[in-house]
Image (cartoon, rainbow, N blue to C red):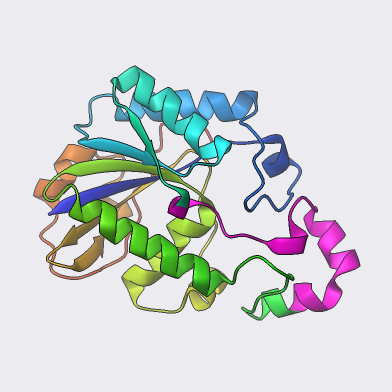
Amino acid sequence: MTVLLLARHGETDWTRSKRWQGHADPPLNARGREQAHALARVLLDVPLDAIYSSDLRRASETAAIAAHIMDIEVRLEPELRENDFGDWTGLTRDEVERRFPEGALRRRRGLKGWRGGESYEEMAERVVRALTRIAASHAGKQILLVTHNGPIRAAHAHALGIPYAEYRRTAESITKGTVSAVSLEKGVWNRLDSALGALPAQALLAAQAVSEWNPVLLMLEALPA
């Protein structure tokens, strides 16, 4: 069984101001760097075969801080990027509501509201494809992947076997600097349970006997919100 630890990047100024980041590339702010160091401390004693990251700075900087402390090289993976939000990129939520009310309504209905970019379904397809490929390269190991809200939720939706748009309407956003654990065995995915609390990741292997995707979230409570 291969275990993938999925971590959301730390905070940026764009995150704080509720701007659509997408493929834009703002760096971590001071709080984001604090969150990255907290992530590294929580995972310090977790055995990892590799660390992968989205190539966007907010993710790669988060991964680099953790990797430096753990003395592991970061492998950049463009397919772990956030959804491309097209002409909404850089706008705040309020600006989108004022400038593109019809698009905002489409998004609330689970559809693509922006022009250009990619749909949630297109993003989810590339993310699941990337995770499956990466897991196959580390069979039976445990790896860390630092990515974004959309890709992590796409993995969770895939775990449930439901469309991403449906999952997005019912599930909360992923808190910055937190981790969820999923596994892959013989082509079948599993998501490990929040009921385990802040259990060390190495204990997840012994705690779960998995045969199918069964989504459950592991939140590391030691991390700042």
- Residue 66, position in %: x, y? 39, 26
Residue placed furthest toward the right: 98
Which quadrant of the rendered structure holds the C terminus?
Answer: top right
Q: Is residue 189 above or below residue 102?
A: above
Tell me where residue 31 appears, x and y as whole percent. 61, 27
Q: Position of residue 187 (x, y in %)?
A: 17, 68
Asked if residue 195 can be seen in this view, the reply is yes
What residue is drawn where x is 56% and y is 35%? 57
Asked whether 84 falls inside the magenta stretch, the response is: yes
Identify whether 139 is placed above or below 121: above
Which image quadrant is residue 104 in?
bottom right
Q: Which residue is drawn at 90% across and 65% down?
A: 98
Q: Residue at x 23, y 40 (%)?
A: 201
Q: Is residue 25 left or right of residue 39?
A: right
Q: How many marks?
A: 0
Judging depth in this view, the residue of 194 and 52 nearest the camera is 52
Above or below: residue 127 compared with residue 114: above
Looking at this view, is 90 or 41 the one in front? 90
The answer to whether residue 100 is magenta is: yes
Asked if residue 192 can be seen in this view, the reply is no
User: Is the residue 185 above or below the residue 140 in the image?
Assistant: below
Give the image quarter of residue 88: bottom right
The secondary structure making up most of the magenta span is helix
Left or right: residue 67 compared with residue 124: left
Q: In this view, does 204 lie to the left or right of 182?
A: left
Closer to the camera in the image, 46 or 217: 46
The range drawn in magenta is 79-105
What is the quadrant of the N terminus in the image?
bottom left
